Amino acid sequence: MAYVVAAVVVLAVLVVLDLLLTFAVLRRLRIHEARLSAPGTVRDELIGRRLPRFGASGATRLVAFFSAGCAPCVEQAAEFARHADAERVAILVLGSASESERQRLLTALGDAPTVITEPDGDALAAELGVRSFPQLLLVDESGTIVAARHSLAALAAGVA
């Protein structure tokens, strides 16, 4: 009988420890999920990085990363094409996009900005650490990223 009581006590302790561990993991997942779903968040590591190939003109530039398979990218691309306050450079990260998705994004961009396509996917985006699209960067005269947001409105609000 003593063995049965000892086994029940050990199992009860293990169950309580398992429940505590489960609740701790759930709590961490909720915190992580809340951070991921927060609108308009941008990784601060982009700010201060250098883009020497875009600083050569001596003017402030607006550099945007768009993915062809992304619906918000098409909306932001149309807004980007209408924006005329800074020199504009659009970088299309094609990845595994279809030709129709690519054409839709190019049509939204129009012929106003300089468009650089990355045929092999996201080489420049990966080099900078851009992982979400659209990503708009404000690059100063020296080629340093001074602001990074997911929309022109958020970028304008952050710079102003």
Image: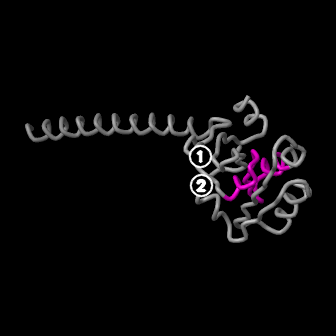
Above or below: residue 142 compared with residue 69: above
* Left or right, 85 with reference to 23: right
Q: Quadrant of the C terminus?
A: top right
* Left or right, 13 with reference to 58: left
Nearest the viewer among 9 and 123 is 123
Per the image, label 1 sits on a secondary structure element best described as helix
Q: Looking at the image, do the residues carrying marks 2 and 1 touch, with CB atoms under 8 Å apart?
A: yes
Residue 100's spot in the image, x, y percent? Answer: 86, 65
Q: Is residue 25 shown in magenta?
A: no
State which quadrant residue 38 falls in: top right
Q: Amino acid at mark 2?
A: Leu
Query: What range of the chain is rendered magenta?
Result: 53-77
Residue drawn at x 86%, y 60% as measured from the top left? 106
Q: Quadrant of the N terminus?
A: top left
Residue 156's spot in the image, x, y percent? Answer: 76, 34
Q: Residue 46's mark? A: 1
Above or below: residue 132 compared with residue 98: above
* Left or right, 97 with reference to 75: left
Nearest the viewer among 44 and 71 is 44
> Which residue is most to the bottom?
120
Q: Residues within 10 Å of mark 1 (few under 14, many from 20)?
A: some
Q: Residues within 10 Å of mark 2 (few under 14, many from 20)?
A: some
Q: Is residue 73 shown in magenta?
A: yes
Q: Which residue matches tag 2?
A: 128
Mark 2 or mark 1: name the one nearer the start of the chain: 1
